Image (cartoon, grey):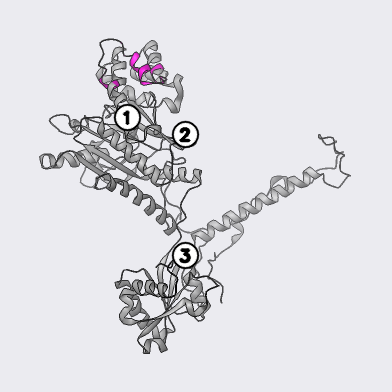
């Protein structure tokens, strides 16, 4: 009865047994003369197994045991607590009537995953606040028309879209930038520019799931609306770098690739690509890292109607190693303002102190058609992960939605899935155990009302309190519960102390070398709303100044 309560699974467990090895289950073959081992060692006598055979059998058994343990752990993780006599257990039948896994490409956030999510999102929000941005949000359901641009973007094929009961074509939002544009235009003249806004929205795209990429994900967005100059892009890049530094990532781990759609536009124009072709051509060029140079050339020919020579020259552009190399392809008499912007961006990044994070990469053009100027993308220098984040300038987007003139804008999106994978790879995923300040326990059922009053008084002072809902039969069980929920202090509500107008509080985090009488204190009920100050003063009195609530 003193053991921690465990979870059990009802039903026949044979369905979860390790698979039978076909080699071991096959009928015995007729004996044959064993050939000499390839390594030159002597063959085993008839009826005995060689050292290699024994080793392989041991490896198979270990593999089966590991698979069985994995399945058993998965079953146990599925189980939830309930009531059955004196033991809290609820099992799951072998074939439950509903699928207990989340829909493909989505995630459940159990408390331990939720703590990690909150930790990450708090870092997102902290950087946004430190940089002077304001948070906003919007419904996850949007009208399809917001995303149906005519550039052949993959995003239009990846939407979770349907027609609602009013006949309106709607979709779960695949990205946040068009929503931002809609909201800005909805307020129009009443907004003071430049706007600096950030959000952490949920987004949905029906695409192939892979490591760091889900169909449902959350994405940190930061955008600046109303600033024409390159300073806006530099500020956004600085925010990304600040976030990485805050979570323990350095420029040796992550780099930021930078290019310019404006420069690429000048180059493509010099090669005969029209303004109408530019956006869809960029969508194809954005696939360069995924499909390679030959397939990129083929798609440029087949889908965009470019001749073979032009397609080859465009792919050659993507291989340029410096801004000057790309500028040289522009030729004479072509607008070189984009080149000057790129050079200025690198100068300002050096002045800001994050120049070592930036890398020029002509292959970065981003797959969304609305980008018009500088584009950038975070990448894993180890080459293990897909793009960490990405963004750029999109001055023409609001014109598509009704702005009477171009509205300068730039921003980035930063997915939550891939950065968690990055932290795992670097071995710096934070340890975030469950923690609570106090566990309040009644001596018996008759003291439960007093325990509830105690919990209420402590919470008034801003402390976290976990009220033990059912008194344990043994004190050891109460301490075991407090340890499992990560409590710092145990508050006992017993008749003798309660009659004296007090409760007893014990510090659970002091070492065994501290005498028991030094670990506990009786606190008056009138002082429970300020119990933090009482305990801090107590620590000082006992010459334990390092003790904190």
Q: Is residue 415 above or below residue 538?
A: above
Say which mark, if any, is on residue 191: none
Q: Secondary structure at mark 3?
A: loop
Q: Earlier in the sequence, mark 1 or mark 3?
A: 3
Residue 471 visible in the picture: yes
Say which mark, if any, is on residue 80: 3
Q: Residue visible at 61% across and 58% down? A: 14
The N terminus: image quadrant: bottom right
Whole-number angstrom distance, CA of label 2 to CA of label 3: 42 Å
Q: Answer whether residue 377 is magenta in the image.
A: no
Left or right of 514? Residue 199 is left
The C terminus: image quadrant: bottom left
Q: Quarter of the image holding residue 376?
A: top left
Whether the residues at callouts 1 and 3 have beta carbons within 8 Å, the answer is no
**Label 1: how many residues lie within 10 Å, few (<14), some (14-19) or many (20+)?**
many
* Residue 454 % position (x, y): 35, 79
Whole-number angstrom distance, CA of label 2 to CA of label 1: 19 Å
Q: Secondary structure at mark 2?
A: loop
Left or right of 428? Residue 349 is left
Left or right of 47? Residue 288 is left
């Amino acid at each position: 009865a003193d053991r921690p309560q465990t979870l059990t699974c009802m039903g026949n467990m044979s369905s979860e047994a390790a698979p039978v090895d076909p080699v071991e289950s096959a009928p015995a073959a007729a004996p044959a003369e064993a050939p000499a081992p390839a390594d030159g060692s002597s063959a085993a006598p008839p009826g005995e197994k060689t050292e290699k055979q024994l080793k392989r059998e041991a490896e198979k058994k270990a593999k089966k045991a590991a698979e069985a343990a994995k399945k058993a752990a998965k079953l146990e993780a599925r189980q939830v607590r309930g009531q059955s006599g004196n033991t809290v257990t609820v099992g799951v039948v072998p074939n439950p009537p509903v699928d207990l896994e989340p829909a493909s490409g989505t995630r459940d956030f159990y408390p331990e995953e939720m703590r990690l999510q909150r930790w990450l999102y708090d870092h997102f929000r902290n950087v946004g606040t430190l940089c002077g941005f304001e948070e906003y949000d919007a419904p996850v359901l949007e009208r399809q028309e917001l995303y149906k641009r005519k550039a052949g973007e993959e995003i239009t094929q990846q939407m979770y879209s349907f027609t609602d009961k009013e006949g309106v074509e709607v979709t779960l939002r695949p990205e946040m930038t068009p929503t931002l544009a809609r909201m800005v235009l909805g307020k129009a003249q009443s907004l003071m520019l430049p706007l600096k806004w950030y959000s952490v929205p949920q987004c949905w795209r029906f695409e192939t799931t892979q490591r760091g990429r889900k169909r449902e994900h959350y994405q940190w967005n930061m955008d600046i609306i109303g600033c024409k100059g390159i300073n806006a892009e530099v500020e956004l890049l600085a925010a990304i770098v600040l976030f990485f530094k805050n979570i323990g990532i350095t420029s040796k781990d992550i780099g930021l690739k930078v290019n310019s759609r404006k420069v690429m536009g000048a180059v493509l124009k010099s090669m005969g690509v029209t303004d109408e072709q530019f956006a869809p051509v960029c969508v194809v060029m954005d696939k360069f890292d995924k499909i390679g140079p030959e397939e990129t050339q083929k798609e440029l020919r087949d889908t965009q109607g470019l001749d073979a020579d032009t397609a080859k020259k465009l792919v050659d552009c993507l291989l340029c190693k410096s801004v000057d190399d790309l500028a040289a392809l522009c030729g004479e008499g072509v607008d070189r303002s984009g080149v000057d912007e790129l050079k200025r961006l690198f100068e300002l990044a050096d002045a800001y102190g994050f120049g070592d994070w930036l890398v020029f990469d002509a292959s970065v053009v981003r797959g969304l058609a609305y980008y018009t100027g500088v584009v950038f993308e975070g990448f894993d220098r180890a080459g293990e992960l897909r793009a960490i984040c990405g963004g750029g300038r999109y001055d023409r987007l609001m014109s598509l939605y009704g702005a009477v003139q171009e509205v300068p804008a730039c921003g980035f999106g930063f997915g939550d899935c891939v950065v968690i994978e990055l932290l795992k790879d670097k071995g710096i995923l934070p340890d975030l155990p469950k923690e609570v300040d106090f566990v309040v326990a009644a001596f018996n059922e008759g003291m439960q009302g007093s325990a509830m009053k105690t919990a209420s008084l402590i919470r008034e002072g801003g402390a976290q309190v976990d009220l033990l809902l059912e008194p344990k039969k043994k004190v050891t069980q109460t301490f075991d519960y407090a340890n499992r929920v990560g409590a710092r202090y145990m508050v006992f509500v017993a008749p003798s102390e309660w009659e004296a107008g007090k409760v007893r509080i014990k510090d659970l985090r002091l070492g065994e070398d501290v005498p028991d009488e030094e670990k506990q204190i009786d606190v008056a009920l009138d002082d429970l709303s300020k119990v933090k100050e009482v305990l801090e003063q107590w620590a000082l009195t006992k010459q334990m100044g390092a003790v904190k609530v």
